[in-house]
Image (cartoon, grey):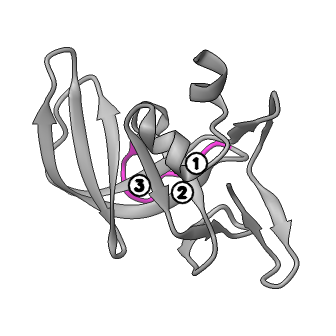
């Protein structure tokens, strides 16, 4: 189960096990997450970091500007719901977050035991994360 959880083979498997964000998006060369038909970015709620707006993300991380629109108390922590474009991203956090502007930071995706931000999509010259 740990292997399937850590490296799901499809968006269906990722969503079946745990709280998962599946965005129709690609990661640009600058690391910015952009909506893109055919692109897929999968990130678990516990892996997403919420940063102040405008903060420079660590190298290799993907990012997007968003707005905290709701926060839910889960007992051991909080789940923030962040609007990023037309989609809402779940991000787990230890403390409650105020509503408002934030930067969503997604660490490099773990695939096949190697950390990487994605593979190049020759048609768009952007990195596609799946």
Indicate the secondary structure of the residue bearing disc 3.
strand
Question: Magenta segment range?
Answer: 50-58
First along the sequence among labels 2 and 1: 1
Which residue is denoted by mark 3 in the rendering?
103
What is the magenta segment's predominant secondary structure?
A: loop
**Residue 57 — which label?**
1
Find residue 116 and report its horizontal and vertical position in percent: 78, 44
Residue 69 shown in magenta:
no
Find residue 18 and report its horizontal and vertical position in percent: 40, 31
Q: Kindly identify the residue that appears in the image at 60 percent across and 63 percent down.
A: 40
Relative to 9, is 96 above or below? above
- Find the residue positioned furthest to the bottom: 123
Q: Are marks 3 and 1 in contact (CB under 8 Å)?
A: yes
Residue 54 occupies which quadrant of the picture?
bottom left
Which residue is denoted by mark 2 in the rendering?
63
10 Å neighbourhood of mark 2: few (<14), some, or many (≥20)?
many
Q: Kindly identify the residue that appears in the image at 82 percent across and 59 percent down.
A: 119
Residues under labels 2 and 1: Cα distance?
7 Å
Residue 32 occupies which quadrant of the picture?
bottom right
Q: Are marks 2 and 3 in contact (CB under 8 Å)?
A: yes
First along the sequence among labels 3 and 1: 1
Relative to 27, is 106 above or below? above
First along the sequence among labels 2 and 3: 2
Residue 114 occupies which quadrant of the picture?
top right
Indicate the secondary structure of the residue bearing disc 1.
loop
Q: Is residue 27 left or right of residue 22?
A: right
Residues under labels 2 and 3: Cα distance?
7 Å
């Amino acid at each position: 189960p740990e292997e399937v959880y850590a490296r799901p083979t499809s968006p269906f498997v990722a969503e079946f096990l745990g709280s998962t964000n599946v965005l129709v998006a690609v990661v640009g060369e600058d690391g910015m997450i952009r909506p893109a038909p055919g692109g897929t970015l999968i990130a678990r709620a516990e892996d997403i970091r919420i940063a102040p707006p405008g903060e420079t993300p660590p190298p290799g991380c993907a990012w997007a500007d968003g707005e905290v629109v709701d926060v839910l108390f889960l007992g051991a922590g909080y789940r923030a719901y962040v609007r990023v474009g037309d989609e809402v991203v779940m991000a787990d956090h230890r403390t409650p977050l105020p509503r408002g502007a934030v930067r969503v930071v997604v660490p490099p995706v773990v695939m096949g035991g190697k950390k990487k931000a994605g593979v190049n999509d020759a048609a768009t010259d952007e990195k596609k994360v799946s």
